Amino acid sequence: MALKPLNIGLVGYGFMGRTHTNGYKRVNDFFPELKHRPVLKAVCGRSPEKVQAFADQWQYESVESDWKALIARPDIDAIDICTPNNSHAEIAIAAAEAGKMILCEKPLALNPEEGERMCAAVEKAGVANTVWYNYRRVPAVTMAKQLIDEGKLGKIYHYRANFLQDWTINEDLPQGGEALWRLDAAAAGSGVTGDLLAHCIDTALWLNGSIKDVTAMTETFVKERMHTETGKKEKVTIDDACAFMCHFENGSLGLFESTRYARGHKALYTLEINGHDASIRWDLHDLHRLEYFDNSDEGRLRGWRSIHVSDHSGDQPYMDKWWVPGLQIGYEHTFVHQVADFISSIDNNTAMHPNFRDALETQQVCEAVLESAKVGTWKNV
Ligand SMILES: NC(=O)c1ccc[n+]([C@@H]2O[C@H](COP(=O)([O-])OP(=O)(O)OC[C@H]3O[C@@H](n4cnc5c(N)ncnc54)[C@H](O)[C@@H]3O)[C@@H](O)[C@H]2O)c1
């Protein structure tokens, strides 16, 4: 049976533009049950030469240099937003009003107020929507969710997560502009809180439920940097590092830390959950492994197991789509999985998560964290 086309209009063709496009290209090869096929209809970027070069390399059918023109095209079904954070709201709201499906990069918005308007727009339009919190779709993390939902951990006491990098230690690094918009709060909204902790928070809300309140500290280690757009030294307004504690609604305690000043760490996302009966641990650098400690194991053999999540004969999530047991997959597959789940939700008219509303909750936690760090007291989410 011929697959129905799902015409994609991609806005922004940087790091995420590539991961998503790879997902669109691969998905039907590995998920043959899907009823739609993504078609790389158009990519949008401000520089006509660069966007054409991207379109040629990745095989997009056409280019646009204005996202409004892309949204106005009747041959586009879904808008994929891969631009810096300060453009998500405007593009998403316009896309929803035009009746397009939307796949938006994280964080959802610059702040909860923008996020609320985005949710209202997609809900009013009734369009399919998702936010690319892709770590939910690492098979080992998906399996952690299954184990928790089955009650294997028992009552949860602790949730701990880190996201550590070291790429901004150099004080000569400028801020702002094409490559360094993440260092400019006007474009990014915040520093590590919205960029990195947002991932940790999304996973935590999914695995362990809502967060009630937070207390946080942030630091900006380098106070001034040259701004690439003005050519002048300007105050740095992002958080370089952030740590926060929180109470989850289920009574467990949370501890989160993120920084771009952890020398030696490039993208170390780790999480650990301790329950009454069992604990789990996961590390992005070893993403195909889930560590698991089960207190009910026979005493002599009790210890941390390192489960290589690659064996679909044991029902390990997503792995029946790939190779033979024992062969692992990687980072890019999480985006293939997200595309597959999004298409499956369209095929079967089922809910897709995380959607804008789910991502708004993460945004609200980020806001409470930043607010708490500013005023130095606990903040309700
Ligand atoms: N899910 C993840 O793990 C993950 C990882 C990295 C980035 N992100 C998110 O993805 C988004 C993009 O990040 P990135 O790392 O791909 O950035 P990037 O700097 O590599 O790419 C951004 C792209 O947007 C383009 N752009 C900027 N303004 C535009 C406009 N007005 N119209 C059209 N194009 C425009 C830039 O030219 C560039 O092609 C951000 O929101 C970021 O937070 C998510």
Image (tube, grey):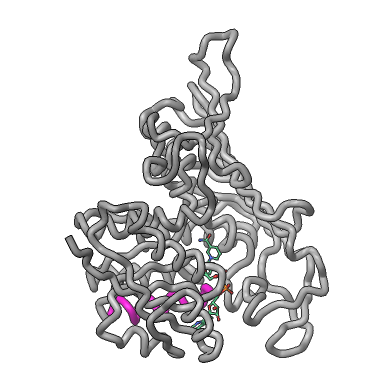
Vertical relation: 126 (above or below) 322: below
Vertical relation: 151 (above or below) 209: above
- Judge whether residue 158 can be spotted in this image: no
Q: Image point 41% across, 32% down: which residue?
A: 147
Q: Image point 56% across, 63% down: which residue?
A: 194
In this picture, residue 66 sits left or right of residue 240: left
Vertical relation: 6 (above or below) 359: below
How many numbered marks have been drawn onto this rendered protein structure?
Answer: 0
What percent of the width, then of the height, locates residue 167? Answer: 73, 63
What percent of the width, then of the height, locates residue 240? Answer: 70, 63
Q: Image point 35% across, 59% down: which residue?
A: 355
Residue 84: say if magenta. Answer: yes
Residue 20: say if magenta. Answer: no
Q: Image point 26% across, 56% down: which residue?
A: 34
Q: Give the residue at the far left of this rendering.
A: 1
In this picture, residue 261 sits left or right of residue 340: right
Vertical relation: 227 (above or below) 137: below
Q: Quadrant of residue 23?
A: bottom left
Q: In which quarter of the image is the N terminus?
A: bottom left
The residue nearer to you, when weighing 197 against 47, is 47
What percent of the width, then of the height, locates residue 369? Answer: 57, 57
The residue nearer to you, when weighing 265 against 205, is 265
Q: Which span of residues is magenta-colored?
A: 83-97
In this picture, residue 229 sits left or right of residue 31: right
Give the main secondary structure, helix, strand or loop, of the magenta stretch. helix
In this picture, residue 122 sits left or right of residue 378: left
What percent of the width, then of the height, locates residue 303? Answer: 60, 19
- Judge whether residue 358 can be spotted in this image: yes
